[in-house]
Amino acid sequence: MELLKDIALNRKIYLLVFCVVFLISISFALYTQHSWEDWYITYRASKNLATGKGLVYTVGQRTHSFTSPLGTLLPALLSRITKNSSDELVLWLLRIIGCSLLGISAVLLLKIAKEISFKVLPAIFLIAMFGIESKIIDFSINGMETAFMIFFLVFTLYVLIVPSRHPLLYIGLSWAGLMWTRPDSFVYFLGIALGYLLFIPKMPTIKNRLALLRFFLGAGIVMLLLYLPWVIWAWHYFGTCIPHTIIAKKLMAPHVHLFNIIFTFPLRYDSSLDAVFMPAAYELGGWGTVPILFSRPLVLLCAFYWCFPFARREARAVSFAIWIGCIYFSIVGVAPWYVASVTLLSILVLSYIIQQIAICLHFLKGVLESNFFRRVKVSIYGVISLLFCVNLILFVSSAFLMRLRQKIIERGNRTQIGLWLKENADSPFDAVFLEPLGYIGFYSQLKMLDFPGLASPEVVAARKKLGTDSFAQLIVELKPDWLVLRPEEIEDIKHQMPALLIIFYRPAKVFDVSQKVTRYAYLPGHHYLEYDQTFTVFKKIPGF
């Protein structure tokens, strides 16, 4: 009878955790209405597939213009199921799926905490920090694939820690899910696998390193069998299985020496790694120094916790995966939806650290003088509470910022630019040169010559031919019908080729919401609003 009560109690706790995390996530979506720029890059291809035009960004041009197969095919399926009746409905269905996956991930994290005998404080910290992490939630509801990354990553850890009947099959499935979600996700599960091979944490059925290696090789075979069909089909359809987004971004990446990064990190600390515990787009400014002082020590602690021999082996394995992720970011740079996976692993490592602190406090209780012990305990609890409070403040600030961003910038400015171009273009084949591809490309439905060429092989070819990323030289080479430029981009072009925007292009319309943005100059992260507050649309003069 007591066992049945425990089972019933556990189910109630798990249901409560799922509901709380789901409600926080869906409330964030309802409040912010946030749709990420890249969602509309992906969804243009998804909708073309759903309407029978092919899995392409520009109809008739087979360019692999998306990174996530799952993040592209699932919206296409949802659009098809709903008879292509509403783009907003497709996004909301995807949001509900994403929020559900976050709720399930929270339950799995709690089961992991239970399996490794977490005390109440670290277990609560784990779920609470996960439940209000702004990047994880935002990029799970704004059209990106983050919720799937988080779920498959948590499921990988769950299978490694909690006994199950078919662990090899489940690991293979979770790794395949990660690859279908993002092709670079092998960095994270290989990091975890290497961490486990290095530190050999206790596992339900595997006793030694050789058995573990065989286990991971078997899981890798399962993963390849499940992911290989996409590779073959993409190669057949696009002529390559490498997303064009990666090809375009690779041209911008500086040449790096892997061993230099490995052996000089963190002495040569990449400030982009601060993003692990920061809100999205923090690098544009306006957040001040306090959040950076919060994020930087935490990511360094989590990335190097594997170096401490007294740490639990499971924690060292996860920490090693964080270190691998940080090295990866130092090479390729970071995007906030990339870094969310490392944020999840870092929250788990912090919870391990709190668990060890709780164990130490238990043993010190009878050793230290009672008043001194009480002060130490209060101080430690204070630091833990401070970490949660800072994360909560960043979460609330991020929600308000994204709400304004969606209202003023995305719907009030960039959507309007796309609609205006669609109405004023001479033909559906007019070409537009710009950097912000998403909203403007989707709502105009014109030919996009985007920089750096995420959906445009012509731009990538021009960059290779000219050996430059100069907007002025690329415009002269490509001769687009329209330009959509920010003020700083206009100044750069005028500096490089003063006559280009006078003789060959004329201003057609200015889209400026700066007066609305100025009202929120006090807001943390306000530079994120300012960055896209003004655009000028230029039209090509006949004869150029």
Image (spheres, grey):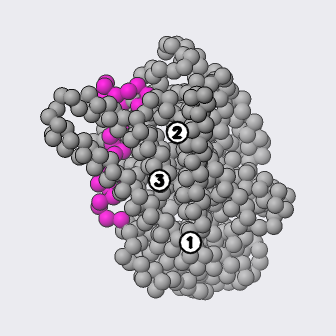
Residue 72 at least partly seen: yes
Q: Is residue 304 visible?
A: no
Near mark 3 (Cα within 10 A), the count class, few <14, some 14-19 or many ≥20, is many
> For mark 2, does the 10 Å Cα neighbourhood hold few (<14), some (14 to 19), or many (20 or more) residues?
many
Residue receiving disc 2? 109
Give the residue drawn at x 24%, y 41%. 377
> As shown in the figure, which amino acid type bears the numbered disc 2?
Leu
Q: Earlier in the sequence, mark 1 or mark 3?
A: 3
Q: Is residue 319 above or below residue 214?
A: below
Q: Which residue is mark 1?
A: 406
Q: 344 and 336: which one is in front? A: 344
**Considering the image in quadrants, where does the N terminus appear?**
top right
Q: Which mark is residue 133?
A: 3
- The image quadrant of residue 395 is bottom left
Vertically, is 2 above or below 49?
Answer: above
x and y percentages locating residue 456 in the rendered image: 65, 60
Q: Residues within 10 Å of mark 1 (few under 14, many from 20)?
A: some
Q: Which residues are magenta?
A: 287-315
**Is 434 placed left or right of 399 in the picture?**
right
